[in-house]
Amino acid sequence: MPEIKFYSGKTIPMEMHKVKIVQKLNLLPAKERLQKMKEAGFNTFMLHNGDIFMDMLTDSGVNAMSDNMQSAMLRADDAYAGSETFYRMRDKLEEIFGIAHLLPAHQGRACEHIIAQHFVKPGSCVIMNYHFTTSKAHVTRLGGHVEELVKDEGLVTKSTLPFKGNIDLDKLKACIEKEGAENVAYLRLEAGTNLIGGQPISYENMKAATELAKQYGIMTLLDASLLQDNLYFIKTREDSMKDKSIREITRMVADLFDMIYFSGRKFGFGRGGGILVRDEALFHEMEDYITMFEGFLTYGGMSVKEMEAMIIGFDETMDFDVISQAPQFIKHCVDELDAAGIPMVTPGGGLGAHIDAREVVKHIPAEQYPAGSLVAALYLCGGIRGMERGTLSEERNADGSEHIASVEMVRLAFPRRVFTLSQTEYVIDRVKWLYDHRELIGGLRFVHEPKTLRFFTGKLEPVSDWPEKLIEAYIAEFGEDQ
């Protein structure tokens, strides 16, 4: 999307679409939000959607469909086997990525399950630029371990570096030689590193990393779930790519990898997923996993209506105007909050705006989940549902101690084509107020802690009466109805 110039001289993001279907929002009074937060166990995942004013939990499966996507759903072929919808999807993905073989799955983590099931053995190593919660859990569940080799500067929250998702090539070579190439199940590069702020990886870094892996005979995988944001950053931040089209960049990236998998809940604006396999023999080796775990080979657990919508969504993902909006809204949000002195992850990446909770609530001990506390406080003070991305999202060490996260963030996701600029300004306003009252926020502790992926369904409680004090201060400022 070209930057729209205003006569006033202001630079603000512009929605490149018009709204024709709306969904009513509901802002509960402050005291009711406190009660809802208690019922949810201070876990924003456990809130009911009707209790939320602005849902910025995730960009997964909550993106707006276009008129063309919705109309495409009417032609879906619902045959159990041999659906023409599947073949249209397969052909579209081959057109974009240049890989002929598609294993369909119901979402990204299903793809991760199948890949790990096939390649990971007890004691084997999976190398990543940075992990995602489910990508790591599938590896460790099977007795493997993950080595995260993002460059050190990628974990520096406040920065001007354009590609903080880049893998450290020296560490990659050293890791391969230490582990032994035969013990490395695969190299997984994530386009748009989710857990460190949606930070992109450059084309040149992907090229160098995959070339190194192939020298050692190691399988290369791309997690393309957040690829659309990463494509935007490659085109706008990587000098050698500025004259390339999004389709050209996508093919250049795809040509580097043996396999590509994606969550259609992010890439394609629908609800589904898939694994693209370059080698035909390997494709046939993995087919059985689909029929065993997902469904038949021509739907893989997906709704064919969603598949038809995603076929159009894949084309829209190749449209620079379409994929520009989310990064520009995120940049606006990050820049405004950063200018106000609020510790943010900079530069703004894809996926969402990320608050550096470790700096905002530095008085809260790491074991009391600073980001979890801050994200709960943000719901209390505005009805905004964000997501904790820190220690609460990690798994405990083998001895039961906390594995303190490298970064401690609150993610405010920007689902594609969903929020307006005025809604974004509301979020900025409430975050500013909460930052000015940050000393009122206290810690949390578990009362129900699942063994795996505890952040999804765990329940917590505050270590003091800090939520009541925070609400009292909020009501004094805005009144009970806000």
Image (spheres, rainbow, N blue to C red):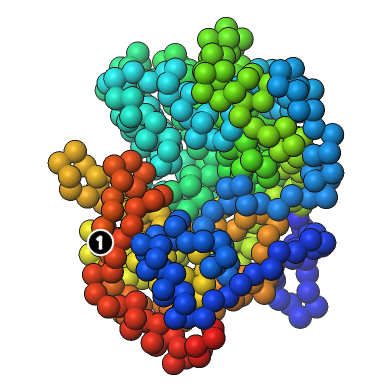
Please name whichever residue, 470 or 159, is drawn nearer the observer in this view of the structure.
470
Residue at (33%, 24%) from the top-left corner? 142
Q: Which of the 4 image quarters holds residue 345?
A: bottom left
Residue at (31%, 61%) from the top-left corner? 460
Residue 463 image position (x, y, % from top left): 23, 70
- Disc 1 crowd rating (10 Å Cα; few below 14, some 14-19, many 20+) is some
Instruction: Inspect this view and state whether residue 287 appears.
Output: yes
Q: Is residue 254 above or below residue 159?
A: above
**Quarter that holds the C terminus:** bottom right
Q: Is residue 435 above or below residue 118?
A: below
* Residue labelled with disc 1: 445
Q: Amino acid at mark 1?
A: Arg
Element under disc 1: strand
Please name whichever residue, 479 or 161, is drawn nearer the observer in this view of the structure.
479
Instruction: Inspect this view and state whether residue 203 appears.
Output: no
Q: Which of the 4 image quarters holds residue 2?
A: bottom right
Residue 128 image position (x, y, % from top left): 41, 33
Q: Is residue 271 above or below residue 411?
A: above
Residue 170 image position (x, y, % from top left): 36, 32
Residue 263 image position (x, y, % from top left): 58, 37
